[in-house]
Image (spheres, grey):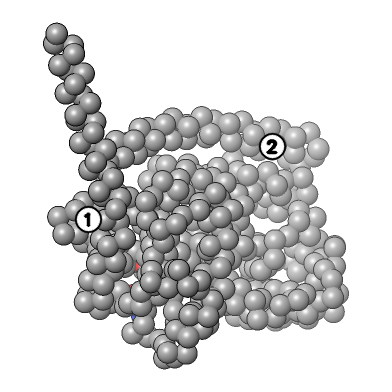
Amino acid sequence: MLVTTDYTEKKTVLIATVIKNQNQVLEEISELNSLAKTLGAIVIKEFLQNLKSKTPNTFIGKGKMEEIKTFILVNNITLVIFNDNLSPSQFKNIEKTLTSEVVDRTKVILDIFSKRAKTSYAKAQMKLAQYKYALSKLPKLWTHLEKQRGGIGFRGPGESEIETDRRNIQTSIKKLKTKMQLIDNQMNTQRQHRKNIIRISLVGYTNVGKSTIMNLLSKAKVSTVENQLFSTVDTTVRKIKIKKQIFLLSDTVGFINNLPTQLIDSFKSTLSEIKESDLLIHVIDITKNSFIKDIKYVENLLLEIGIKKNLIIKVFNKIDRCSELNTKKSRINKIINKKSLKNLLFISALQKQTIKLLKQKIYALTKSIHRNIHRNIHRNIHRNKICLKTNER
Ligand SMILES: Nc1nc2c(ncn2[C@@H]2O[C@H](COP(=O)(O)OP(=O)(O)OP(=O)(O)O)[C@@H](O)[C@H]2O)c(=O)[nH]1
Ligand SMILES: [Mg+2]
């Protein structure tokens, strides 16, 4: 059941439906194209269908379905990826009609994450997300799952077997949660030890340059892959020094539109790294047409997971590739509230000198936190001395 779909060199078509916002879907399908390519699929064609409402059985209309079916047969397509999330019965019906393997956007994202996870903790988080996904598709996804099974320990179809499957997945989820709780506790203790150091997290949409900035600020070697989505799945924490002050900098997993809820759930503790940070560096790829939408999406997602920070630097990255910088700057001035304007930076992570500006900004914004931390440390030392003296008497 946790077998990932093999995308390598598979001739693939993408399908997206438009009910309201065509531009939004166009961006999503281009993102889906990158996601599929990241997994090695060869995308042959994108199908877009305007709909007044979704057809419950097959999701898209009959005529379009026939057109896609013919295209699949003529071009030997073996994989179909839907931009929308499909219900178990839709999966079943569409696969039957198209006689091809069908996956949805959530599955693709989960498969990329599981491929990228390196640490055992990230792997456990991924497994948890995949179990939850499998559980949500289970009842009617029998044939679909069966095709992928091949000796995973589940036997033939039928209601009772499906029930066994469900119980097996639920048991695995329980075990994983217990395992992760133990690691969570250790990580919490580690975080407590770092209390006296200012913590900074790089956050933002995927592929905006977070890891590149991390590497520049910390001389770390977090892998940054040429234009691939979700290079980073594991959180990396590095010490950095600015004017003799020590900071802890975390590089975190990138966000994407319609991030699967299963992923958000299982990445909660990774995200608590962000929650406990004193300062967030929200990185934005200014070359993207949708950069304003990306900002809002990231801000909303942060709010959704309970992260409300006053100290945020918005770093508009990749200015070396941005052709309409001034026009974009005036768009930004209009949407950003006046108070936050001083916390904006325009940089190129490929030009070392602009990183200096970022360092200056980090230092200036966290000065008062440093002062408080030092005051607390001195107060504690003083308190301990008094305690010691009292005990000596
Ligand atoms: N032209 C240009 N490219 C950049 C800049 N910063 C990063 N890149 C490129 O953008 C791509 C993505 O960079 P990453 O640092 O991996 O982005 P990320 O935000 O960590 O991505 P995820 O880990 O996938 O969320 C890489 O190919 C980088 O070389 C920049 O300032 N200018
Ligand atoms: Mg990264």
Disc 1 marks which residue?
240
Q: Residue at x 41, y 68 (%)?
A: 314
Residue 301 higher or lower than 285, as above or below:
above
Which quadrant is home to the N terminus? top right
Q: Position of residue 345 (x, y in %)?
A: 36, 74
Residue 251 higher or lower than 36, as above or below:
above
25 displayed left or right of 42: right
Q: Residue at x 37, y 46 (%)?
A: 119
Q: Position of residue 187 (x, y in %)?
A: 37, 37
Report helix, strand or loop for mark 2. Answer: helix
Q: Position of residue 334 (x, y in %)?
A: 53, 80
Mark 2 closeness class: few <14, some 14–19, many ≥20 residues within 10 Å: many
Identify which amino acid the numbered label 1 is placed on.
Ile
Disc 2 marks which residue?
165
Q: Position of residue 380 (x, y in %)?
A: 24, 31
Report helix, strand or loop for mark 1. Answer: strand
